[in-house]
Image: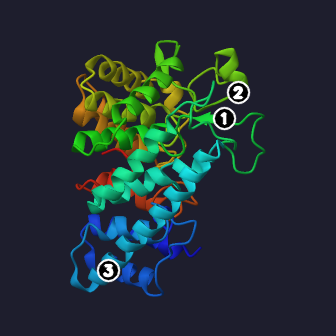
Amino acid sequence: MTSAQSLADGAVGIALLLLETGNRAAAYEALRDATADGVSIADGSSLFYGAPALAFVLATTDHPELAKARAVTADGTATVTRRRLDAAHRRIDRHQQPHYAEYDLIRGLTGLGVVLRRLGDHDLLRQVLDYLVRLTEPRGELPGWWCWNGPERRQPPPPGGHANFGMAHGITGPLALLALALLDGITVAGHTTAINRISRWLDAWQQHTDGTIWWPQTITITDLRGGTPAQRTPLRPSWCYGTPGIARAQQLAAQALHDTTRQRLVETAFTTCVTDPGQLRRLTDRSLCHGTAGLFATARRVASNALTLIPLAAVEDLHRQTTPTPNEPEGLLDGKAGADLVTAATTPWDACLLLT
């Protein structure tokens, strides 16, 4: 894979920052370079790589020199999505468990749905939503999204697989997309049923420790059958796996279903997270994915819709006071572009994080 076509850590993510901060000439040059040799629609194409990544960013500009690239990347996104949907439905028909890359935000169909929503391709987005509804159908004692693989790529999966709760790789990504589509008025059969299935699952695994409300990052079959996660306390309060992203997805679901009781509860969970010094100390960089930028981006969206007071200024101060690491990369998810973008942009670029 060439990093030129990566939204996560390459030129496409940097171009997004340049567009958002008004440096359009440099952004157009980066995008032209990224598309000069065609765009990828290979199996690894996703919201964060290849044609869909480029389509997401190009949707923000009407520059005439990029019109062909916009059309090509939109067509490429549709091609990738249809191919991935066919494979996912075949997998379900075979009664097999998924890998989270089938459905997640970073590499899967949820991320492709984000791009389709941005492009306004509602017909194909509805097909993604139909798939997500099907994904939530239970299979015996397990939810339909229970993965055969483990959460760590470099480690063998736990016996029996796992369920992932995170916004980046887990079921709260599909929950957020289902909720946002419903708020947009884009609906499919079984839409609210799917949202309620995921919400009930999150209710069942809600944890309370020392005045904080949180959810585990993952659970195994042993955890499921014992009714208790091996994770005993909240971990890093990151966008990707932690309470902030999980709470935002549930806040969106609560809004979509007009459930003020759930909304107040998850806003309380978010607040107990960002006012807990022990959790905040676990953030060691200023990145979007794992660090203070992701927390601030999430806090800003939670606060914009909140029924309760969210300590937004304190979260912003935390991010601004966090110094770059000596080896901070340039990219969007883990580096300088994302850390700078969160304080500079005014448009809904954070749709790529499923925050809006």
In the image, taking residue 227 as reference, residue 315 lies left or right, namely: left
Q: Work out whether residue 26 or residue 197 is closer to the camera in this orientation and state it.
A: 197
Instruction: Determine the secondary structure under disc 3.
Output: helix
Proximity of marks 1 and 2: CB atoms separated by less than 8 Å: yes
Q: Secondary structure at mark 1?
A: strand
Q: Amino acid at mark 2?
A: Ile
The answer to whether residue 2 is left or right of residue 23 is right
Q: Residue drawn 58% across and 67% down?
A: 43
Give residue 315's position: percent from left, percent from top.
36, 36
What residue is disc 3 on? 28
Residue 162's disc number? 1
* Coordinates of residue 169 in the picture (x, y in percent): 54, 45
Residue 292 appears in the picture as rendered: no
Mark 3 belongs to which amino acid? Tyr
Residue 156 screen position, x and y as percent: 78, 44
Q: Are marks 3 and 2 in contact (CB under 8 Å)?
A: no
Q: Residue at x 30, y 57 (%)?
A: 123
Q: Earlier in the sequence, mark 1 or mark 2?
A: 1
